[in-house]
């Protein structure tokens, strides 16, 4: 099986919010690994809230839970700030605090909020890609996923990323975010796929990434 992409402009305004969503998913996944206890509380509160049909009761409970989540976030954040600092604990603490404050928003407005760190990183990621005119011959970039991994052909330069260096892939309506080699991230637009089937791309990556672990 093979999937080929030819990169094009990232000018669609809808990519801004979708990129934030992808980076928030990455942040959540990392914090779930580091502080599963905090996320067990968050998931439990959210599940309980979904069962509560009384709007006023739900609003009061949200405020109580918000205080609890802020306290838990601070509890995780403080150790992360002590030298030597632990970035993952800091991120997890911030997530807990953010989720806590979200519980003070009017019901129905929570989905539009995301950690400020995700928004800053998304803006930086898109700025880098929007600063390139992908239509120019010298900037033409082709990405090929096959049995060996990822091959990146940019001009006369070719790089390779084996599946063993890839760690995760996240998806939104128009985008995929592929993580590899530690903190590196590859933002792919679905419209840029020139060979392969969209619905088979993520399962194919996950299968091959899993084989290398």
Image: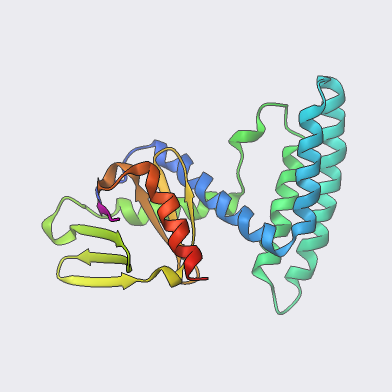
Instruction: Give the residue at x 53% y 49%.
Output: 119
Q: Main secondary structure of the magenta part?
A: strand
Residue 35 falls within the magenta-colored stretch: no
What residue appears at the point 27 percent right and 46 percent down from the top-left corner?
192
When asked about the image quadrant of residue 155, the answer is bottom left
Tell me the quarter of the image containing the N terminus.
Answer: bottom left
Residue 2 is covered by the magenta coloring = yes
Query: In the rendering, at what x and y percent does residue 62 appear?
Result: 82, 34
**For residue 77, above or below residue 174:** below
213 versus 40 height, above or below: below
Q: Residue at x 80, y 28 (%)?
A: 51
In the picture, measured across the screen, residue 66 lies left or right of residue 199, that is right
User: Which residue occupies the foreground of this view, 140 or 117?
Assistant: 140
Q: Place residue 113 in its image quadrant.
A: top right
Tell me residue 141's x, y (percent): 22, 59
Image coordinates of residue 197 in percent, x first then y, are 31, 44
Question: Where are the magenta residues, as a range?
Answer: 1-5
Q: Please state the horizontal and vertical placement of residue 56, each as a whole percent of the image.
A: 85, 21
């Amino acid at each position: 099986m093979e999937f080929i992409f030819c990169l094009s402009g990232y000018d669609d305004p809808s990519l801004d919010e979708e990129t934030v969503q992808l980076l928030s998913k990455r942040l959540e996944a990392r914090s779930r690994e580091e502080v599963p206890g905090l996320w067990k509380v968050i998931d439990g509160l959210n599940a309980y809230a979904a069962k509560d049909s009384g709007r006023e009761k739900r609003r009061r409970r949200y405020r109580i839970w918000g205080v609890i989540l802020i306290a838990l976030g601070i509890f995780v954040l403080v150790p992360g700030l002590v030298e030597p600092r632990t970035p993952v604990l800091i991120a997890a603490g911030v997530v807990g605090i953010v989720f806590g404050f979200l519980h003070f928003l009017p019901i129905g407005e929570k989905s539009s909020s995301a950690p400020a760190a995700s928004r800053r990183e998304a803006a930086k990621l898109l700025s880098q890609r929007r600063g390139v005119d992908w239509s120019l011959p010298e900037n033409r970039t082709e990405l090929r996923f096959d049995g060996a991994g990822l091959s990146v052909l940019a001009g006369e330069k070719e790089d390779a990323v084996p599946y063993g260096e890839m760690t995760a892939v996240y998806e939104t309506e128009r985008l995929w975010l592929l993580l590899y080699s530690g903190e590196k991230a590859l933002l792919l637009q679905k419209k840029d796929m020139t060979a392969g089937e969209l619905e088979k791309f993520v399962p194919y990556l996950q299968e091959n990434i899993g084989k290398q672990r």
